[in-house]
Image (cartoon, rainbow, N blue to C red):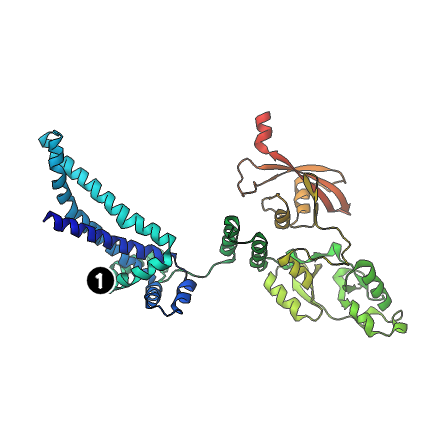
Amino acid sequence: MSMLALLAFMMLTAGTAVFVAAEFSLTALERSTVEANVRTGDRRDQLVQKAHRTLSTQLSGAQVGISITTLATGFLAEPVVARLIAPGLSAVRVPEQFVSGLALALAILLATSISMVFGELVPKNLAVARPVPTARWSAGPQLFFSFTFTPLIRFTNGTANRILRRMGIEPAEELRSARSPQELVSLVRTSARSGSLDPVTAVLVNRSLQFGERTAEELMTPRSKIDTLEAEDTVADLSEAAVRTGHSRFPVIRGDLDETIGVVHVKQVFAVPYGERSSTRLADIVQPVAKVPSTLDGDAVMSEVRANGLQTALVVDEYGGSAGMVTVEDLIEEIVGDVRDEHDDEPPDVVAAGRGWQVSGLLRIDEVAESTAFRASEGDYETIGGLVLETLGHIPEEGESVELTAFNPDGSIEDPVRWRATVLRMDGRRIDLLELAELGHRGDVDGAS
């Protein structure tokens, strides 16, 4: 009788292992992986797909199976193990009145430990490490058990679903396979840190995923950096401006960027006979330009710019004024980084300088973080120049410095890093160029004082 009970204990523990393996392997699998495996023609993958499509039901079935096998394991094994242990306790001269209770306690501990290790932990770790092969051998028994105990599983699962609905939560039969851009960005960063994704590729994918969350205001070239031409200027002036600036497109205005009448492209110069270029006004050849609100998301801006023959759009703020201009080059650079050619005579936006960096005041905070170790918190500013202005509280002079506090490289805020920002060049009231230098952790100063 004892041997039969022990054999039943081993079989029940194996049953628990099957249910645990099915539970963890099915939840670890992505729908795309399951569907790709089905195309190989393996019947086991078809069973996995069937179980994965009814995941909530299968998980309920696994829980019912685990409960049944665990209870049965304790019911059968503990008395038998206690009887086997009792003679040993008597042999070591344990008082007779304590033998029965101590034997039962040791039996519970031993049976529970064996069931936990071999029935739960081993199959759980196996399913997490190798979910596909584990699901292949466990999905069949799991489906058979769920079919056999359908009434009980429907009752328990239905009861749980009704409780969720009363809490205002709609139950789902399958795991959500779609990922938000934020989740995908997190996955990309994790893959890059683990070395499974090339850092350059990780940056490119990361920028692409975040592109749709950018607004036209973040993507545009601000109006303070836009070179314009007047409506009364000539085609010859357009040719000269293209040579001087290296730009190919220019907004045509009547006195102010808010009065933009359109855009001209340098290629239009060649459509005008050479002798007429000095007399042909830009107002006569200007092409209409699309206008987009500053709050429009990156994907919509891309569609608008691509639909426009000039691949340009004027960004309009909430008051109807022109905030800046966005071109297809701006959008490409947002994804792949700074694109420079032989006509770009301006220095890069970020240049290493000693133990710090010289950065353009127009760089966004996230762009600064990509090129340096400086990571600031969000606030009522978009650019590094805006952060310095907010911290100072006034328009700075060239050479003026201010201390900034930033996150650690790992994103933590404990013992923050101190930085010094020095204004190197002003463009009117705008910070055009500044230098960032790391000073050390805040705690270093506190500890010294």
- The location of residue 64, given as percent across then percent down, is 24, 56
Give the residue displayed 73% in from the left and 37% down from the top. Answer: 400
Res 98 visible: no
In the rendered image, the vertical position of residue 165 relative to residue 432, given as above or below: below
Q: Is residue 10 left or right of residue 20?
A: left
Q: Is residue 70 left or right of residue 28?
A: left
Res 437 visible: yes
Q: Quarter of the image holding residue 310?
A: bottom right
- The location of residue 351, given as percent across then percent down, is 70, 46
Q: How many marks?
A: 1
Q: Quarter of the image holding residue 268?
A: bottom right
- The location of residue 285, given as percent across then percent down, is 80, 72
Q: Secondary structure at mark 1?
A: loop
Residue under pointer 1: 149
Give the residue displayed 31% in from the left and 49% down from the top. Answer: 122
Give the residue displayed 57% in from the left and 52% down from the top. Answer: 199
Can you say which quadrant of the picture contains the C terminus?
A: top right
